[in-house]
Amino acid sequence: MAANRRRGEVEAVLDGQAHRLCLTLGALAELEDAFALEDIASLAQRFGSGRLSARDLTRIIAAGLRGGGTPATDEAVAAMAIDGGAAGAARIASELLTAAFGGPEETTDRP
């Protein structure tokens, strides 16, 4: 199960199992609702601040799992073992957000 970065997918090991995560438009809409934001620009701005709580990380990872096709509640994700603990969760969330919104390492020659 290789993640396709061009489609915004990332791979992560949660509870000892490899998962493909993706912040699809539906997953991003869930996050807009969860954070009571009106649009995707507000969502990008909120995440661009670099300040994410443990609840934020849980919500982002859970939305990514659902977007990748794995049914998971926020509560289930909060109980999962993540390699690296909170730092590992932050890395996964960062990779998801970069895949969804782009980042400095993204190139401009994408088709």
Image (spheres, rainbow, N blue to C red):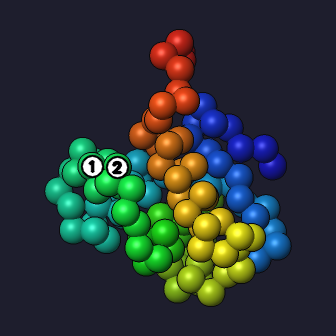
Q: What percent of the width, then of the height, locates residue 33?
A: 28, 67
1 sits to left or right of 54: right
| Whether residue 66 is visible | no
Asked if disc 1 and disc 2 are in contact, CB closer than 8 Å, the reply is yes
- Dot 2 amino acid type: Gly
Q: Badge 1 is on which residue? A: 45
Q: What percent of the width, then of the height, locates residue 95?
A: 57, 49
Numbered label attached to residue 68: none
Q: Badge 2 is on which residue? A: 48
Examine the rendered structure and indicate whether residue 109 appears above or below residue 78. above
Q: Secondary structure at mark 1?
A: helix
Q: What percent of the width, then of the height, locates residue 75?
A: 52, 86
- Dot 1 amino acid type: Gln
Q: Secondary structure at mark 2?
A: helix
Q: Residue at x 29, y 61 (%)?
A: 32
Decide which of 71, 42 is in the foreground and name it: 42
Q: Residue at x 58, y 36 (%)?
A: 7
